[in-house]
Structure formats: structure tokens, C-alpha cells
Amino acid sequence: MGGMKYLLRILYFGAKVYWRLFRPKTLGSRTMMIREGHILLVKHSYQNYWFFPGGGVKWGETYEEAALREMKEEAGAEGGNLSFLGVYNSYTQGKSDSVALFLCEDFTYTGRSDGEIEEVRLFPLDQPPENLSPGCARRLKEYRAGKLADSGRW
């Protein structure tokens, strides 16, 4: 895995350079996977943060289809019903990213993922990891307070 992790870090760095130069508009989808007081999070091999499973929306794919695909690829998860929560905007790393957020409370998972994910783990809702990504931390805080905004900055 060491070589693959190194390659992914190089590719991620290249993507960040591209984003800074060309400032693309991108579409993404993430899913808050919550069950029995716990949230399922993934840690990418090339980043230091934990995230809700998710990623880019492919050509011809809906936000919901992307969410289901990313759940499976990143966490080995199969989701039941997805509830749409909102669309948020992120302007980090030089790109303009629109992120659709879903909630899934009916899922199974194996924890097996593609080579991009270093770790898949359930955390207590009230004890997320300190290095939860800022956007995911905002949404989780809003969710726990019962005041989830349906749009705004990621």
C-alpha cells in the first residue's frame, strides 16, 4: 500500500495545481451515514481529514447515484433510503465545488474500500474525530443541533 499511497498523494497534488490554474466548477455528493448514535466516516490515504463518504459526480450520473456509488466504493456500504439534505458550495483549493448532501440511516457496510481510503470507522455522534474536515464538522454540528441549513458554504 505504501507505493499506492505515494502515487495517490502525487496525483492529488497534481489535481490541486490544476484546480489553482484553471478554477474548474465541480459537482460532488456526500452522505452522512448515521446509525444507532454513530456516524460512519472515511479517511483518505492522501489527506489528513476524516470525511463523510463521497466524491465527484460522474458524467450522466445524478447526485443520488453518485452518493450510492461513493458509499460502496469508499466504505463497502449499501444504503437503503437516502434523504436529500441540501446543496453547499466550497471554494477551497481553487475550484468552485457544489456538494449535494444526503442522509442515510439504513445501511450495511463491510469497511472494504477502494485503494483511495485508508480507514473506515464508526464514531459516536457526540465524539467525532478532532481532524474531521471543516465542512463535515459544520454539517454534523448543525445536524446534532437540529438546525441543518439546506444551503450555504460547505
Image (spheres, rainbow, N blue to C red):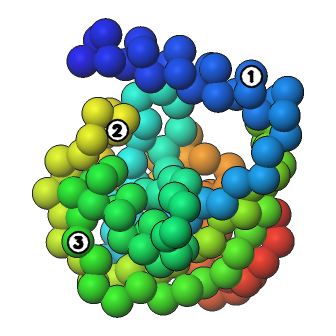
Q: Is residue 54 visible?
A: yes
In depth, the one of 86 and 38 nearer the eye is 86
Rendered position, 21 above or below 54: above
Q: Position of residue 31 (x, y in %)?
A: 47, 69
Residue on which disc 1 sits: 17
Which amino acid is tagged 3? Answer: Glu
Which is nearer the N-term, disc 2 or disc 1?
Answer: 1
Answer with left or right where residue 27 lies relative to residue 70.
right
Relative to residue 11, is residue 75 drawn left or right? Answer: left
- CB-based contact (under 8 Å), mark 3 and mark 1: no
Task: Point out residue 98 in the picture as x, y percentages from the top left corner.
Answer: 73, 63
**Closer-to-camera residue (11/42):** 11
Q: Is residue 154 above or below residue 23?
A: below
Callout in the foreground (3, 1): 1
User: Foreground residue, 9 or 22?
Assistant: 22
Give percent across and percent down for residue 2: 29, 12
How many other residues sit within 10 Å of disc 1, few (<14), some (14-19) or many (≥20)?
some
Circle nearer the N terminus (2, 3): 3
- Above or below for 120 versus 148: above
The N terminus lies in which quarter of the figure?
A: top left
Q: Quadrant of the C terminus?
A: bottom right
The residue that disc 2 covers is: 117
Q: CA distance from mark 2 to mark 3?
A: 17 Å
Q: Is residue 136 left or right of residue 76?
A: right
Q: Which residue is mark 3?
A: 78
